[in-house]
Image: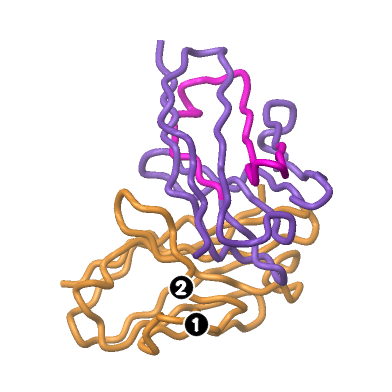
Amino acid sequence: QVQLVQSGAEVKKPGASVKVSCKASGYTFGRFAIHWVRQAPGHRLEWMGWINAANGKVHYSQNFLGRVTITRDTSANTAYLDLSGLTSEDTAMYYCARMYTTGWRFDYWGQGTLVTVSS
Amino acid sequence: QSVLTQPPSVSGAPGQRVTIFCTGSSSNIGAGYEVNWYQQFPGTAPKLLMYDNNNRPSGVPNRFSGSKSGTSASLAITGLQAEDEADYYCQSFDGSLRDVIFGGGTKLAVL
């Protein structure tokens, strides 16, 4: 069965960077794009960007340009989210999600990784 | 960033019907991009509830239905049950931004 398993919770200081991983299993990794979505406590879902798992091409939300980097390791069936210049406003649950082959829908989600930014 | 607009909350009694609306613009829903809906329970990841406006993934009860017209979409839930109490998010794509966009979420309370 399809699974996306994310790395564990992180606590970071302001100004630091965080890297979250998303390991996929149960399907051919390169056939589906991986997106990253975050949700601050009590807030809406906020899309961050995505990566074409086959060729590594990325597209980022304007809201995170310059701070976010999404990569993947096809040998490990894993996608990564790197977010730099952390502030308290980056405290959120970060989700990876698989995009179905057609349309812009997310059919499987990771369990989420809580990133807390605190001095 | 372009977003989709949803009411913050809706409520209904068990057995009733509720509808959640999602309003977009000419660069997303109005441009023909499909609308998807997600259901999220506290402390859990969102789950795909409706895709391509009005299609239910396997396992989603037919009490849930979706529609789209012009620059808006809606999710209807009939025969409301206590287990339906959750947050619901609409999602689409914006052709001008080339970004995925979400609504602000609607909290459904079953009275």
Q: Which residue is label 1 attached to?
A: B56
Residue contact between numbered discs 1 and 2, judged by CB atoms under 8 Å: yes
Decide if residue B32 is on the left or right side of residue A97. right
Q: Amino acid at mark 1?
A: Arg
Decide if residue B89 is on the left or right side of residue B83. right
Q: Which residue is label 2 attached to?
A: B49
Question: Considering depth in this image, is B2 or A89 the residue closer to the camera?
Answer: A89
Quarter holding residue B79: bottom left
Q: How many marks?
A: 2
Eyeballing the image, is B106 above or below B49?
A: above
**Image point 37% across, 39% down: which residue?**
A41
How busy is the neighbourhood of tag 2: few (under 14 within 10 Å), some, or many (20 plus)?
Answer: many
**Image point 74% across, 27% down: which residue?**
A66
Quarter holding residue B95: bottom right
**Chain A, hue in figure:** purple
How busy is the neighbourhood of tag 1: few (under 14 within 10 Å), some, or many (20 plus)?
Answer: some
Q: Secondary structure at mark 2?
A: strand
Decide if residue A62 is on the left or right side of residue B107. right
Chain for mark 1?
A: B
Magenta-colored span: A71-96
Which chain is orange in the picture?
A: B
Q: Which label was assigned to residue B26?
A: none
